[in-house]
Amino acid sequence: MVSVVIPMYNAADTILECLRSVAGQSYRNLEVIVVNDGSTDECGELVGNFMESCDFPVVLISQANSGVSAARNAGIKVASGEYIAFLDADDSWCQDKLKIQLDILKENKNIFFLGSAANGRELSWFFLRKMKFLQALPVWCMLMRCFVFTSGVIIKRDVLIKMEGFDESMCYAEDMDLWLRIVRSYPYFYINQSLAFCQNSMAGLSSNLKAMEKGELRNIAKARSLKLISGSVYFFLCGISMLKYGLRIINLKSVK
């Protein structure tokens, strides 16, 4: 079984499309756990109505607003599947997302942490590296470009329990913090095929860019402290991160 964990906060405009993308999966051995993180809109009621028409288990958990990390951890705790797939409430999956990933996991027993491209962003080459359909990615790749879309990730539940889930004290870049802890023991494998659609609203990021950059630099420093990257790679990644931060600010101003 795959447990699909969906954290939800004021997602009335997107949650049904998200859930329909799960209901439309060609892989059917699944359960859905929606964690309502103190929403003030009608998204909880929408999920309740959706549950009545499902042919697979749907669990709705309600909690006081505690942040996305706490919501995901709450879903992990009650999940019963061998694997956990994360899906944000404003994202969606292609129809064969879980089937493609489960086929790979069944054929490769050494893979515990698997993700995919999203939004049609497959790459033929990356930094002189020819991209294959399935490959293990080094940590510097994960930190340099967003190869680990949370809504494209599927992980062995036992691994998440061992790593004690997401750091609930972090508000930004909390997902990469967990990924770095995982790759110390379990390599990250990447499917170079777009299996998810992830929203990226510049308006929603406008007041958070500085905090996001701070979280990204913190994770690069953490990778260095965990000896996942060398000192020279650390400084290179910091430079790339600050360059991207500047370009995001310019892009945001041009949008406005």
Image (spheres, helix red, strand yellow):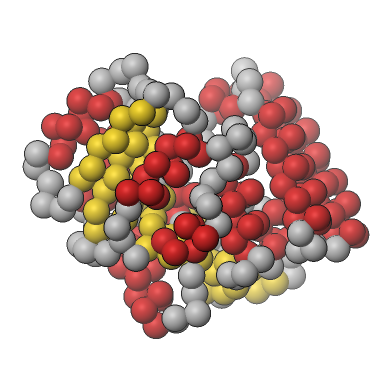
Depicted 57 relative to depicted 243: above or below = below
Choose between 68 and 77: the one closer to the eye.
Answer: 77
Assign the N terminus to one quadrant of the image: bottom left
Residue at the image point whose x is 20% and y is 62% from the top: 28
In the image, residue 164 lies at what x, y percent? 53, 52
Q: Nearer the viewer, residue 128 or 142?
A: 142
Question: Which residue is at a point 70% across and 62% down the rendered structure image?
Answer: 139
Can residue 145 be seen in this snapshot?
yes
Q: Which residue corresponds to the image point at 54% horizontal and 25% vertical from the top-left?
A: 204
Q: Position of residue 132 (x, y in %)?
A: 56, 75
- Residue in the foreground of this view, choosing between 51 and 120: 51
Residue 26 position within the rendered picture, expressed as x and y whole percent measured from the top left: 22, 63
Q: Quadrant of residue 131?
A: bottom right
Residue 73 lies left or right of residue 215; in this view the side is: left
Quadrant of the drawing holding the C terminus: top right
Residue drawn at the location 39% of the way across and 50% of the way down = 76
The x and y percentages for residue 238 are 82, 46
Relative to 75, is 252 on the left or the right?
A: right
The answer to whether 22 appears left or right of 140 in the picture is: left
